[in-house]
Image (spheres, rainbow, N blue to C red):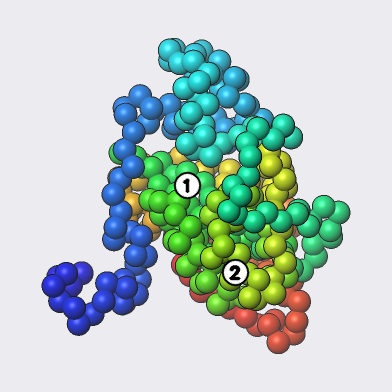
Amino acid sequence: MVEPENKRISLSRQCELLGLNRSVIYYAPRVESGEDAELMRLLDEQYTKTPFYGYRRMTIYLQNLGYRVNHKRVLRLMKKLGLEAIYPKPNLSKPDKEHLKFPYLLRGVEINRADQVWAADITYIRLAGGFIYLLAIMDWHSRFVIEIEVSNTLEAGVFVETLKRALEKGQPEIFNTDQGSQFTALDWLKILQAKDVQISMDGRGRCFDNIFVERLWRTVKQEEVYLKEYQDVWEAEESLKRYFNFYNFERPHQSLKYQTPFEVYQNGLKTKENKGAKRGNF
């Protein structure tokens, strides 16, 4: 990188030239205490295997491993990881009055073409000394991952830039997310509304409303994250980019009749003029 006092090239332009995300430049590890970090690793891995476990079952699981934890501590760590059991449950929290909510539009809808529905979600990615977050924007029909973002923060602004990049590559008819603050932020919603994209949001406590992204996280973690020990955000980002390129262009999916997501995406595009569209590597 150019020294900070050199103002001829802005930091944003330097990142663009080097193919880096600005969030990486400002990265500061989110460090947990030794045992909390280990508990979060165990909770994340077990949730991938048993997403129907709530905090009480997770407490028993950790206690059986020999950890002296109570359900309050486990609940706190699961909230930090953004984990909740996959089943409908009472709405125990009030929505943020400053953020808009939208209905779930996909119940009973036949999804049969590319760019009909996109979905986005955020998950926790562990590092050797802390953790970061990963956002993925995916086409539901093909499971093709349109765009990703690795970030040390959950600030909505980082993910708004990711959305802009995704929409430079294509445009969905419907965009589905959960009701997280990143996806109910006005800047995020305004971009979709300006493109006349219909906004759909999962019901609270209904992770199955975005089931294809939930399956994506399980695949990414089992085939990539849990096999690695990322030392820092740089290593994590580069490794995840390589994995998603493999996932999109090389990995055959059983649910897609052993085609790759890219092959299904290409075949499912809704108009002839887009038929030959190409999506580059991350």
Residue type marked 2? Lys
Q: Residues within 10 Å of mark 1 (few under 14, many from 20)?
A: some
Q: Element type at marker 1? A: loop
| Residue highlighted by disc 2 | 190
Q: Position of residue 114 (x, y in %)?
A: 72, 69
Q: Position of residue 181 (x, y in %)?
A: 55, 51
Q: Position of residue 122 (x, y in %)?
A: 53, 50
Q: Position of residue 264 (x, y in %)?
A: 70, 67
CB atoms at circles 2 and 1 under 8 Å apart?
no
N-terminal-most mark, 2 or 1: 2
| Residue highlighted by disc 1 | 224
Q: Which mark is residue 57?
A: none
Q: Is residue 177 above or below residue 206?
A: below
**Can residue 109 be seen in this snapshot?**
yes
Measured in 3D between alpha carbons, the distance from the residue under mark 2 to the one under mark 1, in whole angstroms, is 34 Å
Q: Is residue 164 above or below residue 35?
A: below
Residue found at x 61% / y 64%? 189
Residue lying farthest bottom?
273
Residue situated in front as seen by the camera: 81 or 91 = 91
Residue found at x 47% / y 67%? 161
Residue found at x 23% / y 80%? 9
Q: Quadrant of residue 127?
A: top left
Mark 2 or mark 1, which is nearer to you?
A: 2
Q: Quadrant of residue 262?
A: bottom right
Q: Element type at marker 2? A: helix
Residue situated in front as seen by the camera: 202 or 116 = 202
Residue type marked 1? Glu
